[in-house]
Image (cartoon, rainbow, N blue to C red):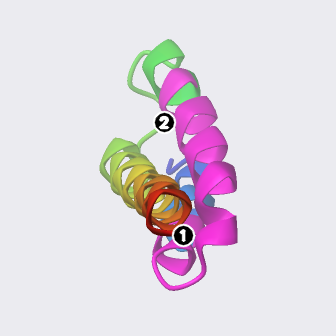
Amino acid sequence: MKDRAATRALVLGLLALPFGIFGPFAIISATRSLLRIRASNGELRGATSAAAGLVAGVISVATIVAGVGYWLVAS
């Protein structure tokens, strides 16, 4: 059975790429999903979706932080 939070993390991660505000929510959802999947001893699946959502969320947050940092330095 696939963990629904893994799909949610993937969707939020993909939404975070153009709309950065979803980045932290993707990271939180993916982390919770990965912990739940690991604790299920193989009953839950979806680690790949959760990991992809986590990566997309981290990329989004890193881009926002770098952009704000650049804006502060350049101004």
Q: Left or right: 69 with respect to 28?
A: left
Prevailing SS of the magenta stretch: helix
Quick one: SS at disc 1? loop
Q: Residues within 10 Å of mark 1 (few under 14, many from 20)?
A: few
Above or below 46: residue 53? below
Residue type, mark 1 in image: Ser
Taking the magenta stretch, the answer to whether it contains residue 56 is no
User: Who comes first in sequence, dot 2 or dot 1?
Assistant: 2
Q: Where in the figure is residue 21, as x and y percent of width and height?
A: 69, 68
Q: Where in the figure is residue 22, as x and y percent of width and height?
A: 66, 66
Read off the magenta span. Answer: 12-35
Residue at image point 56% right, 79% down:
15
Q: Nearer the viewer, mark 2 or mark 1?
A: 1
Taking the magenta stretch, the answer to whether it contains residue 32 is yes
Q: Nearer the viewer, residue 4 or 10?
A: 10
Residue at image point 54% right, 43% down:
30
Above or below 19: residue 33? above
Q: Nearer the viewer, residue 7 or 61?
A: 61
Q: CA distance from mark 2 to mark 1?
A: 49 Å
Q: Residues within 10 Å of mark 2 (few under 14, many from 20)?
A: some
What is the quadrant of residue 56 in the picture? Answer: bottom left
According to the image, label 1 marks what residue? 75
Residue type, mark 2 in image: Leu
Quick one: SS at disc 2? loop
According to the image, label 2 marks what residue? 44
**Residue sitting at the far bottom:** 18
Q: Is residue 43 visible?
A: yes
Above or below 53: residue 51? above
Q: Where in the figure is residue 34, as x and y percent of width and height?
A: 48, 31
Residue at image point 35% right, 46% down:
51
Q: Which mark is residue 30?
A: none
Q: Left or right: 12 with respect to 54?
A: right
